[in-house]
Image: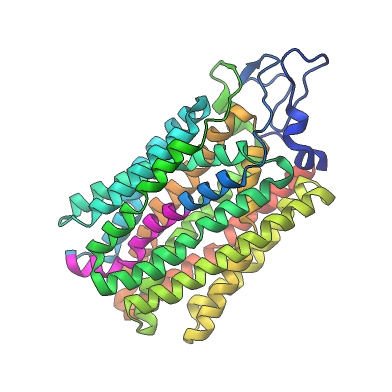
Amino acid sequence: MHDVLQDRGVWAGGLRSMVLVAGEPGPARRGPGMSEHDPGAHRTPATVLAPQGWSPAVILLLGVAGMLDFIDRFVFSAANDAIKHDLHLSDATVGLLGGTAFALLYGVMIVPFALISDRGFAARMASFGIAMWSVATALMGCAHMIATMAATRICVGLGQAAFSPSSSALNAAYSIPEKRSTSFAVSYGISYLGYVIGLAGGGYLVEHIGWRATFAAVGLAGIPVAIAMHLFIPEPPMPHVVRNGESWRALLANRPLRALLFYGMTSQVVSYGITLWGVSFYMRSFGLSSGAAGAWFGIGIGIASVVGTFIGGPIADRVAVRFGFSGAMRFAFWAYLVAQPFQILQVMTHSLGLSLVMLVLTTVISALCTGPIYGAIPTVVPVHRRAAATGLYALLANAIGIGLGPPLFGWISDLLTPHFGADALRMSLLVAAVLGFWPAIHLFQLQRRLRQ
């Protein structure tokens, strides 16, 4: 999320100030993340292109695809205990399958996929990714050994590594700067319905048809969306850029982006740890069945994420118009910070009702920052680096978050079981909730740097 944006015109005016039509008289203008002597690329007058324009149909289709992303990613959480007992695994091993196995190729391949997307293949990469993870999820239901389960889970990560940066590039290309937070809020808001379906619907299906049939059902649902993505979303035009190998150094040299990368890494370790173990927490600590736990947790976190994201995007856009880009990030910082005490209370209380209320409050408030955070990435980098920047963010945030969070808190649960019994997972998630204050530090650093 590269160069510091110093006035509200960058956010509100956005790419309009970056456009120079080939042959048009006058000096080239620079946009966010572009300096006159940008070492990442030599620009011709046609280097920077205008946005495609606001396309709600594309944003909606990206949202549906993102919803399937979340379904196939988190249905594993609803099946945690069923897989554990069927394959005779420990919590740490389940965490490795659900998190680390997913993150293995995700982390390795997301940057190459991002570079391919930045060269004019974003829509095709998105279609490929959806098809890959859908087939892999369906095949997961056929696994009878840890190695087979790990292989299919790795392929789910591979598909989602292709989709993540390409979908962000498409979202930015088919939106306008004045509505960028709103655009990302819409697509991510729809995506978060995948929490409800993956956790609540997944829990119901696991209880009634078993985890194997559940994986087959949710996996095959993605194939029609992959086909629609391939047939109906044109590749947005990309600028002609002569690259000299400095692109990655330019990305990493950007201080706001670095702050966002650290925020992404730390927040996703906590988020994925709590999300993957959330259903098991309500089963063990409150005695719920997998269907009931999945329903309560999935509906709570899913609907709350949708509501918070839909509200936060437009608010951030309005704040940015009045106070500049740093104002939008300041709004994100306070939203994230205020949510953390509720998360601690959620895992500490022994009242199911209070825990669920705290779950909803935590999720709604923290989700307010989703639109501005994800909308910031393509706003502050040149158009030809959007997928690369998103890929770098996803690599560090998701690969580390998914790869480290679930097994870390599963391992802590195993470690504490002799002392706390069924409450060991509760204590493990308390550690996660306390760590939730760490990401807020990086959001504070981000908004402070943007004001300088």
Residue at the image point whose x is 26% and y is 48% from the top? 152
Q: Position of residue 106 (x, y in %)?
A: 38, 42
Q: Position of residue 288 (x, y in %)?
A: 36, 82
Which of 26 and 64 lies nearest the eye of the viewer?
Answer: 64
Residue at the image point whose x is 81% and y is 48% from the top? 321
- Give the side of residue 328 with respect to residue 102, left or right: right
> Is residue 161 something that shows in the picture?
no
Residue at the image point whose x is 67% and y is 55% from the top? 313
Q: Quadrant of the N terminus?
A: top right
Residue farthest left in this picture: 144
Q: Which residues lie in the magenta part?
A: 67-86
- Give the side of residue 134 with respect to residue 303, left or right: left
- Give the side of residue 284 with respect to residue 315, left or right: left
> Is residue 20 something that shows in the picture?
yes
Please say if 365 is above or below 423: above
Please say if 284 is above or below 125: below
